[in-house]
């Protein structure tokens, strides 16, 4: 695996590959690599000839500088894990490389869907996220970009951004690939935050996938949106140590809440806090 730190170096390596007709897949990360990231790389390897990943802790998507400073950084271990997983090029830019000439400001706004659910909890987060993702896309110019289904709202917003950008021809169109959420043996969605859960808190964290399971069962029994919602929220009522922040059923095509009587696939999204650890999860449910 080649490690490159400048825009010029990564752009040169990628363009050489693309000129020879080969396909490039890109997985942007903020490091703290875990099995979930490795599954994105496995999907990229299946699709493309060259796999590029980046580690960049993007200051623009943090709502406080304390959060940004506290974000776990483990460059050496991350680089080893990514090399072992089959990444060909690891891009490790500095802040100046990503935001040159003092252009350290948001250039993309996530709109209405950027300010609800995760966006309500972290104002401005999605604007900063889209700004860096678009900048990284401009630099790397991949054919495919791979993101995890666990961050459903992020994925929705990136898809929406690409749907607006791809037809403009500002760069070659990028195809978005969605990797399914990776779970541990008990069903907990993998996240770098899980490390911060104590032995006592781990079973409490299972409230999230259990609530989603209950909602699925309610729908399978023929219940509608309110029955699925009630089944999931009852799990939280029975486990007050898991503090529910939001639970909603949205249309995956619009991220707008669905109405009772909706038929088709809806996405149940949930966020809850266990101790100090904020967790999210989601599941597609067929009505
Ligand atoms: O999901 C993440 O790790 C980040 O939001 C991303 C997409 C790498 C942008 O900084």
Image (tube, rainbow, N blue to C red):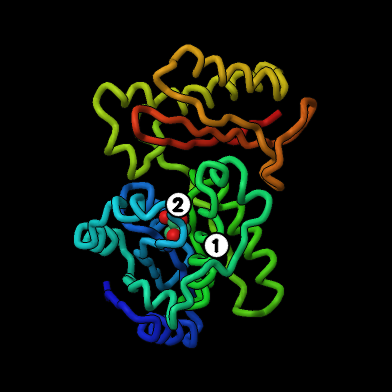
In percent of width and height, residue 124 lies at 54, 54
Q: Is residue 236 left or right of residue 268?
A: left
Q: Determine which of the numbered discs, if any, sits on residue 218 in the image.
A: none
Whether 249 is drawn above or below 7: the answer is: above
11 vs 254: above or below: below
Residue 66 place in picture, x, y as percent? 33, 51
Dot 2, how many residues are within 10 Å of its Cα: few (below 14), some (14-19), or many (20+)?
some
Ligand 1 under 8 Å from disc 2 Cβ: no
Helix, strand, or loop for circle 1?
Answer: helix
Q: Is residue 150 left or right of residue 165?
A: left
| CB of mark 1 near ligand 1 (< 8 Å) | no
In the rendered picture of this protein, how many numbered marks are placed on residues?
2
Mark 1, Cα crowd under 10 Å, few <14 / some 14-19 / many 20+, is many
Q: Which residue is mark 2?
A: 63
Q: Is residue 89 visible?
A: no
Q: Secondary structure at mark 2?
A: loop
Question: Foreground residue, 278 or 87?
Answer: 278
Please state the horizontal and vertical placement of residue 251, each as a whole percent of the image.
70, 40
User: Residue 261, relative to residue 118: is it above or below?
Assistant: above
Ligand 1 quadrant in view: bottom left
Residue visible at 37% across and 72% down in the picture? 95
State the residue at coordinates (45%, 62%): 60
- 248 left or right of 99 in image: right
Q: Is residue 16 above or below residue 77?
A: below
Report which residue position mark 1 lands on: 130
Q: Quadrant of the N terminus?
A: bottom left
Residue farthest along the top direction in this orientation: 238
Q: Is residue 90 visible?
A: yes
Residue 164 horizontal side relative to residue 74, left or right:
right
Q: CA distance from mark 2 to mark 1?
A: 14 Å
């Amino acid at each position: 695996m080649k490690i490159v730190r400048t825009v010029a170096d990564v752009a040169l390596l990628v363009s050489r590959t693309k000129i020879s007709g080969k396909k490039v897949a890109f997985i942007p990360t903020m490091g703290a690599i875990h099995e979930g990231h490795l599954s994105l790389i496995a999907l990229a390897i299946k699709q493309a000839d060259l796999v590029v990943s980046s580690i960049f802790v993007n200051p623009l998507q943090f709502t406080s500088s304390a959060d940004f400073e506290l974000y776990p950084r483990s460059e050496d271990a991350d680089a080893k894990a990514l090399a072992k997983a089959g990444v060909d090029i690891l891009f490790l830019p500095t802040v100046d490389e990503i935001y040159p000439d003092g252009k350290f400001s948001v250039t993309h706004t996530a709109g209405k869907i950027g300010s609800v659910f995760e966006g309500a909890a972290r104002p401005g987060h999605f604007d900063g996220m889209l700004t860096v993702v678009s900048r990284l896309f401009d630099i790397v110019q991949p054919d495919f970009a791979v993101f995890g289904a666990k961050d459903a709202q992020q994925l929705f917003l990136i898809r929406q951004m690409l749907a607006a950008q791809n037809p403009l021809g500002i760069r070659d169109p990028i195809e978005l690939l969605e990797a399914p959420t990776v779970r541990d043996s008990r069903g907990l969605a993998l996240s770098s935050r899980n490390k911060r859960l104590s032995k006592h808190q781990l079973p409490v964290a299972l409230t999230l996938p259990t609530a989603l399971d209950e909602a699925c069962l309610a729908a399978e029994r023929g219940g509608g949106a309110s029955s699925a919602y009630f089944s999931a929220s009852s799990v939280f009522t029975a486990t007050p140590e898991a503090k529910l922040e939001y639970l909603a059923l949205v249309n995956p095509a619009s991220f707008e809440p669905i109405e009772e009587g909706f038929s088709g696939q809806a996405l149940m999204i949930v966020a809850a806090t266990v101790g100090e650890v904020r967790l999210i999860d989601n599941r597609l449910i067929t009505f």
